[in-house]
């Protein structure tokens, strides 16, 4: 049952309807055939609905604010123009809270309006005994507003392909990475960093989250290894550039940075082996109910999530979690970053290739962007490392970039030029070759020898 008129729902409800029509293509697509500006009493709302319908009819996508600004200049009535500006501002600022309910209720309202029209038109047809026409009217009314999204229609959807915001990528802190993946991870994308234990994987996630928050995005950071407060300190260290083990003595600097931060960060800890992807999904829904709408999700890390069912092989559990995570990213229409381990052999390599992924090789294939961070013992001492692009759906892969890594503040500086492969030490079958014992290792052994002898 729906209300008799759109005005009965109140002004706030109508603003959210317009907000949905401006930003949700599938919603507009489904009700396009039954939506009419005459359903609204407010003149400003009528003008906006008319422009939405006119633009969608021609370009098959939502009208942009730039187009509305141009069309608004053609309005001669100054009072109406001011009212339209105000309603558009309210619509674009409208919260996503209860948006699913608003869309469903408004769709039902329009369907009921179509049924009313069909019944009224059937009165005269009934007198004439034209039952076939009555049946046609009722069938058309029942089908009105039904699901019409059959996918990307190549001929009709050319405008949406060429819009800059069709992926809405969130950039990483590193220009070289942004350049190869069309600006960063976009809606529904799943990105994955591989690295050895203690190599700085969790710090990479902090860097990604903190950089996004600095740009004004809301970040939801899930941690399954580290405590919430300690991860918060790592964010403090990244923002201030002060080492994480000293940050507790620099509260004024932290509070100053927090006052300047445009985005928000929520850090939520879950116990290893207790939380599943469903646990994260429930928490995500709770944050939205409380008014926090994330733009980016970080999971540290997917391998530690519990699966819904038990498998005989650990690999099958891992693959299940990774497929579900990718599916979750698509369902939420949000980018997700996570990290994973490399195996023992990969931890010794100058460049970590895809075959060194721990647990399952398939996780790399599931992700849209897979990058490895190689940091051997010498790298950890000298603060160096290498990014290697293992897989990239949005551009080239196989490139390697040098990295300066500070795992006290989470600052990773990535060289924009590719790493010189001449510096790469090829593996050797000789167990005493420099592929295992380089000059750094020899120096460490020598130091330990004389320390013990002395």
Image: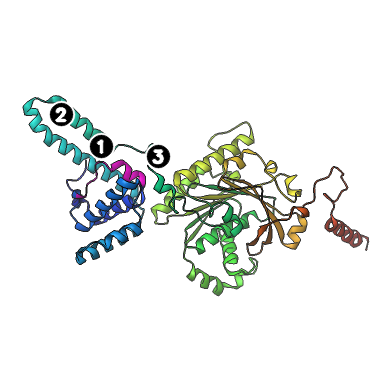
Dot 3: few (<14), some (14–19), or many (≥20) neighbours within 10 Å? few
The quadrant of the rendering that contains the C terminus is bottom right
Mark carried by residue 352: none
In the image, what residue occupies the spot 40% across and 39% down?
153
Q: How many numbered marks, from 0 up?
A: 3
Mark carried by residue 153: 3
Q: Where does the image place residue 106, in percent across and percent down from the top left?
A: 26, 45
Circle nearer the N terminus (1, 2): 2
The quadrant of the rendering that contains the N terminus is top left
Boundaries of the magenta span: 25-37
Outermost residue to the right: 453
Q: Nearer the viewer, residue 37 or 365?
A: 37
| CA distance for labels 1 and 2 | 15 Å
Mark carried by residue 134: 2
Up the image or down, 285 lies above or below 111; here it is: below
Mark carried by residue 144: 1
Circle nearer the N terminus (3, 2): 2
On whether residue 163 falls in the magenta region, the answer is no
On whether residue 33 falls in the magenta region, the answer is yes
In the image, what residue occupies the spot 93% across and 60% down?
453
Say whether marks 3 and 2 touch (CB < 8 Å): no
């Amino acid at each position: 049952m729906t209300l008799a008129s759109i005005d009965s729902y109140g002004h706030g409800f109508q603003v959210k309807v317009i907000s949905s029509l401006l930003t949700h293509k599938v919603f507009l697509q489904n009700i396009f055939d039954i939506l009419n500006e005459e359903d609204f009493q407010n003149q400003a709302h009528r003008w906006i609905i008319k422009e939405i319908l006119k633009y969608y009819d021609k370009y098959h996508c939502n009208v942009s604010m730039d187009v509305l600004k141009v069309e608004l200049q053609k309005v001669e009535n100054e009072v109406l123009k001011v009212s339209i500006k105000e309603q558009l501002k309210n619509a674009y600022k409208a919260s996503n809270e209860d948006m699913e309910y608003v869309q469903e209720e408004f769709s039902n309202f329009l369907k009921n309006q179509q049924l009313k029209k069909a019944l009224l038109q059937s009165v005269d047809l009934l007198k004439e005994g034209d039952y076939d026409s009555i049946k046609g009217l009722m069938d058309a009314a029942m089908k009105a507003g039904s699901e019409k999204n059959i996918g990307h229609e190549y001929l009709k959807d050319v405008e949406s392909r060429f819009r800059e915001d069709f992926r809405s990528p969130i950039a990483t802190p590193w220009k070289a990475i942004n350049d190869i993946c069309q600006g960063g991870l976009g809606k529904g994308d799943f990105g994955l960093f591989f690295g050895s234990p203690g190599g700085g994987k969790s710090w990479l996630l902090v860097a990604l989250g903190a950089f996004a928050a600095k740009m004004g995005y809301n970040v939801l950071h899930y941690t399954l290894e580290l405590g919430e407060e300690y991860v918060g300190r790592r964010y403090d260290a990244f923002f201030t550039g002060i080492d994480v083990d000293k940050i507790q003595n620099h509260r004024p600097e932290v509070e100053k940075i927090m006052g300047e931060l445009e985005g928000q960060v929520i850090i939520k800890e879950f116990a290893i082996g207790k939380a599943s992807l469903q646990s994260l999904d429930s928490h995500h829904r709770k944050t939205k109910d409380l008014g926090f709408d994330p733009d980016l999700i970080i999971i540290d890390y997917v391998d530690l999530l519990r699966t819904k069912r038990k498998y005989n092989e650990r690999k099958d559990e891992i693959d299940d979690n990774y497929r579900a995570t990718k599916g979750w990213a698509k369902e939420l229409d949000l980018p997700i970053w996570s990290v994973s381990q490399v195996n023992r052999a990969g931890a010794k390599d100058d460049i970590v290739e895809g075959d060194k992924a721990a647990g399952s090789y398939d996780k790399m294939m599931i992700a849209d962007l897979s990058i490895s961070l190689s940091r051997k013992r010498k790298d950890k001492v000298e603060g160096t490392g290498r990014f290697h692009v293992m897989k990239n759906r949005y551009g080239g892969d196989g490139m390697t970039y040098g990295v300066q890594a500070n795992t006290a503040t989470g600052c990773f500086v990535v060289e924009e030029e590719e790493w010189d492969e001449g510096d790469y030490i090829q593996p050797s079958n000789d167990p005493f070759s420099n592929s295992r014992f380089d000059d750094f290792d020899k120096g460490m052994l020598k130091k330990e020898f004389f320390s013990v002898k002395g």
